Amino acid sequence: MTKTNNFSALYSEKDIQILKQAEDSLDPRIDRIDEIIAYAKESKISKIGIANCTTFIKEANQLEGILTDAGFSVEKVHCKFGKVPFNELVPGYKGISCNPAGQAKYLEEKGTELNIMMGLCLGHDMIFNARSKAPVTPLLIKDRKLNHHTLIVFKSDDKSSVSANQ
């Protein structure tokens, strides 16, 4: 880092606005979904996107209902959108590939102002975040071994009991 440590210079006006609106919508008495709703209302967002893994279709549908009931327009797209043959991307691979770049493009074309990521695979989440034109916030992360409860690793006294190195 620079010797002056002028970290403030790292932030654009848009970044500062996101920080302010997030801070203004904080309430430790509400859950993550309600926190996203409060942030979106504080930010005057009207259209929210959901990019989900097919594993979480039921939950994505539930979230769509919650957001719609809160007054938002919602666009939703699952990871197999476009049905891209995996061998078109990686020769020799079989099946239908996940399509995080396609998810990001779809939500961009629909004009979403905030995207919620639900359970995209490792790597796929990185591509989606990099390609999304709207800010992205995670709601669920995929952790197959721990039934999507990764935090348990940090709460265990015996880290080896939940370690991936077993």
Image (cartoon, grey):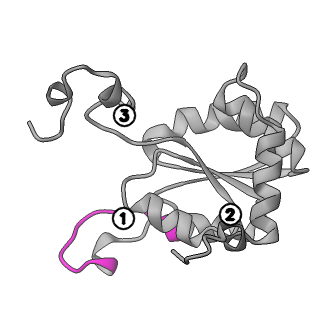
Q: Position of residue 9 (x, y in %)?
A: 71, 74
Q: Secondary structure at mark 2?
A: helix
Q: Which mark is residue 89?
A: none
- What residue is rendered at 36% in x and 64% in y? 97
Residue 97 is labelled as 1
* Res. 82 visible in picture: no
Q: Amino acid at mark 3?
A: Thr
The span from disc 3 to disc 2 (Cα, nearest Å) is 27 Å
Q: Where does residue 8 sit, x and y in percent of width and height? A: 71, 67
Which tag is nearer the camera, tag 2 or tag 1? 2
Q: Position of residue 32 (x, y in %)?
A: 65, 31
**Which amino acid lies under the numbered mark 2 shown in the image of this protein?**
Leu
Badge 2 vs badge 1, beta-carbon distance below 8 Å: no
Q: Which numbered tag is attached to residue 150?
A: 3
Give the class, few, some or many, for how many residues have Cα within 10 Å of label 1's Cα (few <14, many ≥20).
some
Residue ID at (76%, 45%): 22
Q: Residues within 10 Å of mark 2 (few under 14, many from 20)?
A: many
